[in-house]
Amino acid sequence: MKVIVGLLLAGLSVAVLADDATTDERHAKMRAKLIEKFNAADTNHDGKLTLEEAQAGLPRLAQNFSKIDTAGHGYITIDDIRMARRQHEGRPRGQHKGAADPAS
C-alpha cells in the first residue's frame, strides 16, 4: 500500500512540475511578445512609449496609459507595463472585470 501511495505522490509531483514548466514557457512567450510589440510601437527607439506611440502601436494599452504611467511622466516603460500587469493580476476578479489588459 505504501508503494502505491508513493507512486501516486511521485506521479502528482511530476505532473505539477510539468505544469510549472508549461506555465514558465507560456510566461516566457508572453514576455517576448510584449517586448516585441513594445519595441515595434516605440518608433523613436528611446525605450519609452508616449501616449501617441501607444495609441498608434498598442491601442488597448493606450486606453490604460494614465493607470500605467503612475509617476505622470508622460511616457511608460516596459517595466511600468510589467508592474501594472502584476497589480492587475493580483486583484480579485470582480475588481477588474471589463478592464482592458494593459499589455495588449
Image (spheres, rainbow, N blue to C red):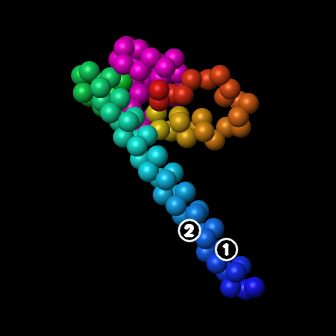
Q: Between 81 and 1, which is closer to the camera in this rendering?
A: 1
Rendered position, 91 above or below 49: below
Badge 1 density bin: few <14, some 14–19, many ≥20, Cα 10 Å: few
On screen, residue 42 versus residue 26, left or right, reads left
Across and down, in percent, residue 74 comes to 41, 20
Across and down, in percent, residue 15 comes to 58, 63
Q: Residue furthest left?
A: 44
Q: In the rendered image, is residue 51 in sight? A: no
Q: In the rendered image, is residue 93 in sight? A: yes
Which residue: 46% across, 46% down?
Answer: 26
- The numbered dot on residue 39 is none
Query: In whole angstroms, how far apart are the C-alphas of marks 1 and 2?
Result: 10 Å
Q: Please tell me whether mark 2 sits on a helix, a strand or a loop.
A: helix
Marks counted in the figure total 2
Q: Which residue is mark 2?
A: 14
On screen, residue 61 versus residue 87, left or right, reads left
> Which comes sooner in the sequence, label 1 or label 2?
1
Q: Is residue 81 magenta?
A: no
Q: Which residue is mark 1?
A: 8
Q: Please tell me whether mark 1 sits on a helix, a strand or a loop.
A: helix
Badge 2 density bin: few <14, some 14–19, many ≥20, Cα 10 Å: few
Across and down, in percent, residue 47 comes to 30, 31
> Which segment did they paint magenta?
52-80
Q: Amino acid at mark 1?
A: Leu
